[in-house]
């Protein structure tokens, strides 16, 4: 039985699954893999202080345009003047946390010139709260650090969101899940963060982006005074973000590989794990099959299945595999 991992569902004493086990002792509790990833990324972003600024900008821009038809029309007109097909700002709050943030980041990255242009006009033609909001948004949006983070997150969240999508596939097996997780972890480990930062630095040139002059401070205290210092600092931040992602994902998924976890035993059914050597194959998976048989014995025997023949039937698969490959 799959759940989101909340105590009300998976609590050892009074959780729903614990109560189910009283009547159905062989039920296998599974913490949703998609939710595991969501928690791992949330944990990761807690270590990246600037992510709070990014989230505030994304959510406040969403509200600024979602709750004001006038602002939304103004953004569309700015986009039309710049020949940019504007995407509607995305609410970062939702059940699919990773997917919402990826869409929000992509939308802002694409809309950036139109958003900055529209906010500039709002700051000029309005007074009071609306003016202060527009000027405040642009102060952050036109900071070098924000552009670096925005562009990096586009690449980072694309990797993570692709993993999230794969984990939502109903046909995914445990082996598929672990393979996808390992693949993304490897790509994050080998991501050349220094080159990404240097390429972005070259793209910004004389601290201009889409025709707008950027600032180094961005309103933050103790901000790096030079572009070189910022690049050094942001390279360290991005490298740590990738490393922390790998660490927290590993923490959330490591129980699949723990000895004695019934889910780990199911991996013997994936032919990709079967050894090619005939002698090794003859011994492969026997202990796992015995544990699975014992775990589901009540169910199997209620269906009048002869549990003593299961290991023998498992051995017959070796013959079929060997014959198939001859």
Image (tube, rainbow, N blue to C red):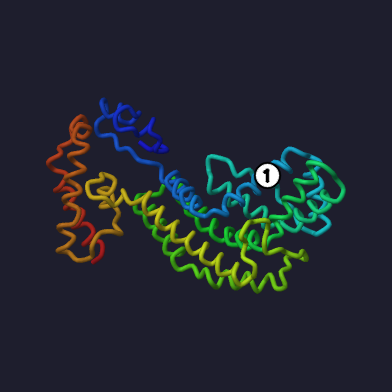
Q: Position of residue 93 (x, y in %)?
A: 58, 41
- When asked about the image quadrant of residue 277, the answer is bottom left
Q: Quick one: 320 or 218, which is closer to the camera? A: 218
Question: Residue visible at 47% across and 46% down?
Answer: 38
Q: Is residue 169 visible?
A: no
Q: Quick one: 180 or 239, which is closer to the camera? A: 239
Q: Quick one: 87 or 54, which is closer to the camera? A: 54
In the rendered image of this protein, does residue 266 appear above or below residue 21?
Answer: below
Left or right: 163 in relation to 298: right
Residue at disc 1, secondary structure: helix
Question: Residue visible at 30% across and 54% down?
Answer: 270
Q: What residue did someone put label 1 on?
A: 60
Q: Residue furthest front?
A: 222
Q: Position of residue 61 (x, y in %)?
A: 70, 46
Question: Residue visible at 84% across and 57% down?
Answer: 81
Question: Residue visible at 72% across and 64% down?
Answer: 214
């Amino acid at each position: 039985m799959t759940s989101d991992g909340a105590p009300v569902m998976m609590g050892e004493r009074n959780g729903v699954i614990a109560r189910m086990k009283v009547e159905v002792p062989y039920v296998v509790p599974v913490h949703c893999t998609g939710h595991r990833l969501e928690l791992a990324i949330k944990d990761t972003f807690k270590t990246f202080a600037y992510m709070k600024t990014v989230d505030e900008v994304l959510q406040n821009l969403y509200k600024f345009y979602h709750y004001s038809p006038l602002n939304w029309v103004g953004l569309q007109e700015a986009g039309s003047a710049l020949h940019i097909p504007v995407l509607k700002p995305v609410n970062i709050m939702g059940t699919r946390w990773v997917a919402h943030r990826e869409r929000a980041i992509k939308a802002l990255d694409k809309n950036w010139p139109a958003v900055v242009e529209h906010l500039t006009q709002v700051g000029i033609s309005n007074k009071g709260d609306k003016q202060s909001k527009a000027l405040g948004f642009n102060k952050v949006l036109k900071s070098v650090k924000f552009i670096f983070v925005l562009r990096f997150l586009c690449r980072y969240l694309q990797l993570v969101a692709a993993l999230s999508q794969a984990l939502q596939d109903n046909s995914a097996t445990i082996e598929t899940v672990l393979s996808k997780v390992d693949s993304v972890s490897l790509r994050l480990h080998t991501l050349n963060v220094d080159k990404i930062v240097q390429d972005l630095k070259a793209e910004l040139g004389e601290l201009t982006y889409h025709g707008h002059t950027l600032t180094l401070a961005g309103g933050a205290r103790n901000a790096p005074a030079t572009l070189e210092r910022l690049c050094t600092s942001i390279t360290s931040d991005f490298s740590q973000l990738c490393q922390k992602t790998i660490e927290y994902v590993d923490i959330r998924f490591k129980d699949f590989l723990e000895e004695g976890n019934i889910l780990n035993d199911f991996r013997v059914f994936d032919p990709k794990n079967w050894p090619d050597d005939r002698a090794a194959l003859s011994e492969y998976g026997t202990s796992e099959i015995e544990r699975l048989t014992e775990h589901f014995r009540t169910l199997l025997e209620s269906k009048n299945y002869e549990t003593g023949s299961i290991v023998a039937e498992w051995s017959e698969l070796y013959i079929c595999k060997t014959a198939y490959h001859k």
